[in-house]
Each structure stands twice: as C-alpha cells, then as structure tokens.
Amino acid sequence: MSLPLEVLRLELGPFLANCFLLRREGEEHTLVIDPGFDGNRIEEALTEWGAEPVAILLTHAHIDHVAAVGPLVRVHSVPIYLHRDDLALYEAASQQAAAFGLEIEPPPPPDHDLSHGQRLSLAGIELEVRHAPGHSPGGVVLCTDGRAFVGDCVFAGSIGRTDLPGGDTATLLRSIREQILQLPGSTILHTGHGPDTNVEREALTNPFLTGAIDLAG
C-alpha cells in the first residue's frame, strides 16, 4: 500500500501564486509544481523538508507559475514538464516579467510534453494529466490520490481570468465542467492562488459555475 501524500503549499512572489511540494510521506524524492518566484524560499522549504526535487511540473506557463524554474534547474538539474500548447507563453517568460517591471532568469526549455490522458509515475506518485485550456491554451490539471492540482482554472469561489492572450471564457468553463467537476466530490483542489477547496463545494457554491454570475451577459 502506498504511503500517504504530503503537500506543502508556498505562497510566492508579487502575485501570491501557490507553489506546491509533493511527495510520499517521509520520502526524500519530491515533485515541485508551479515554482513561481522566490526560488530561495523554495530551496529553504526543500531543505527543511529534507527533500530532493526530481521533477518540475507546470500547470501552465504564466510568469507567476514559472519564474523560479531557471534557478531551480540550475541547482538541481531536474526535468521540466509542460503542455506544448503553452510553449509560446513559456518561451516568452522574460517578456511576461518585463511587462510587469520584473526581471527573471530565463527558464530552460521543457524536457517533456504533458498531454491529455497521460499517466506519469514520478517520485513514487502516479499522476493523471487532464488538458484544461481556457485560462491559457496549455493549462493542465494534475490528479493523484484524491487530489487535483488545478493551476488557475478554478479557485475557491471563483475561476481563472480569461483576458490574457490565449484565454477564453467559454473554453475555461467547459474545461472546469469536463475535467474538474467530473472528479469525485471529495477531491481536494489545490489551486494556483488562495486556499484549497474541493469539487463538491465549487459545484454547489461557486457563483461562476452555478449560474449566479452570468458570464455571457
């Protein structure tokens, strides 16, 4: 029987984006999901956990989720996983940062493509990849052990913005309904900003999903 998962959430950078460290309980090998900004803080958390990263997984390629990829890879030489539809965004990470008056270390090219239906086995963790565009073209949801790392698709009581290049509201709502709300209601949703939530809570109370807010109006 697999050991339980340990999840550490780090709220990082000027956009307060969530980075997650994920591992089996007590294990050294760890996955880093969405390392945005504050690479030093991520390193401190890894040290405190006695953890060694083995891969970086990106739910999408907006700057607040990829800014610390370069520093992490420079230190740890770990592979990077990204959906190919977000490659253009990823390659423009430095330009994204400059648009906000920020400067980052350019991230190295991704090593592996993520694709819908793909199953990964990393650090003793089995993950299912679900393509969930709308916030960005190559957004993905990463599912494992009753949890889903949903990036900026959906938040507690809200949804991701769709006014950035490649965003589309109808596409995002479809992705949420087909790739997230179809998961068991108890599934914990680890969101790209703010606190965790779960599928049942968002299906029943999120005004963007219940129709209380009319996005077509």
Image (cartoon, rainbow, N blue to C red):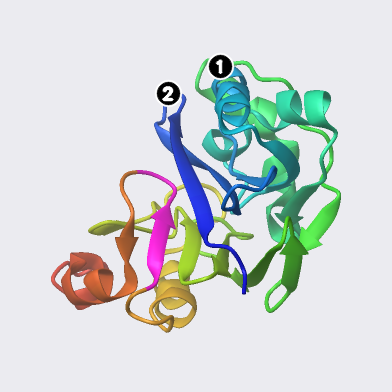
Q: Which mark is residue 102?
A: 1
189 is within the stretch colored magenta: yes
Element under label 2? loop
- Relative placement, left or right, of 122 versus 191 is right
Q: Which mark is residue 14?
A: 2
**Residue 119 can be seen in this image:** yes
Write down the quadrant of residue 52 in the picture.
top right
Judging depth in this view, the residue of 26 and 177 nearest the camera is 26
Residue furthest left in the image: 212
Query: Where residue 126 appears, x then y in whole percent?
Result: 67, 69
Which image quarter is the N terminus in? Answer: bottom right
164 is within the stretch colored magenta: no
Q: Can you tell which of label 1 and label 2 is closer to the viewer? A: 2
Q: Which mark is residue 54?
A: none
Specify start and end residues of the magenta stretch as a single range. 187-193
**Residue 216 can be seen in this image:** no
Residue type for callout 2: Pro
